[in-house]
Image (tube, helix red, strand yellow):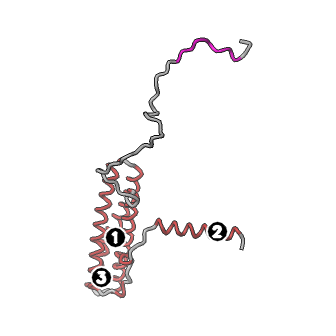
Amino acid sequence: MSVRWWISVVVVAIGGFALAQNTPPAPAANQPIEAAKVPDNEKLKVSADSVSVMRAALKDVLQKLEEARNTKDVVKLTCVNEKLTQIKGLLRISEQSDVALQEAIARRESQTADHEFTKVTIARSKVDQLRAEAEQCMGQLAFRADENATIEVETPDYLPKGDPSVTQNIPRTIDSRPPPASPTM
């Protein structure tokens, strides 16, 4: 095996590890559920719960959007607004699918009910992912700043005292004109 092969294996392994570290794992409860195995009354309950969780996510991301506006950070604002737009679309689809699910169960159309239920569960998992991405936009996964936090800085004794950016007024008087750069002048 050549050195290039080993290098490519190491690069792929490190890249896969870094990618796994940057993508938050989706909880098992938020994964799409196989609709055919779920009884109809449970489908209605799970669908209603999913829609309410998505509405809560929408409110949370709206607060993050307001926070980004207040900080006047265009990058954060654009990022959060993109996630918010996607969540709004998924929520609208989920609400329509929830109504269609209720109608399909009332008409005893199992395939239609399974389809609508699947749409809601997939939308919920995507909304959960978008909510986490909106938090990443704001940088809140890395740290959370407290407004009342204080920072105490200790300067080492061996550093010069005073502010180095302040210059002292040094008189610059020129006693004589310097010699010409060229003898022809």
Residue matched to label 3: 43
Q: In which quarter of the image is the N terminus?
A: bottom right
Q: In which quarter of the image is the C terminus?
A: top right
Q: Please, is residue 112 above or below residue 154 in the view? A: below
Residue matched to label 1: 93
Outermost front residue = 157
130, 43: nearer the viewer: 130
Does 176 appear in magenta?
yes
The magenta stretch is 172-181
Kindly identify the amino acid type of the residue bearing the numbered disc 2.
Ser
Q: Distance between the residues labelled 1 and 3?
A: 16 Å
Relative horizontal placement of residue 177, taking residue 98 as reference (left or right) = right
Quarter of the figure with residue 144: bottom left
Residue 45 % position (x, y) = 26, 80
Relative horizontal placement of residue 168, taking residue 3 as reference (left or right) = left
Nearest to N terminus: mark 1 or mark 3: 3
Quarter of the figure with residue 62: bottom left
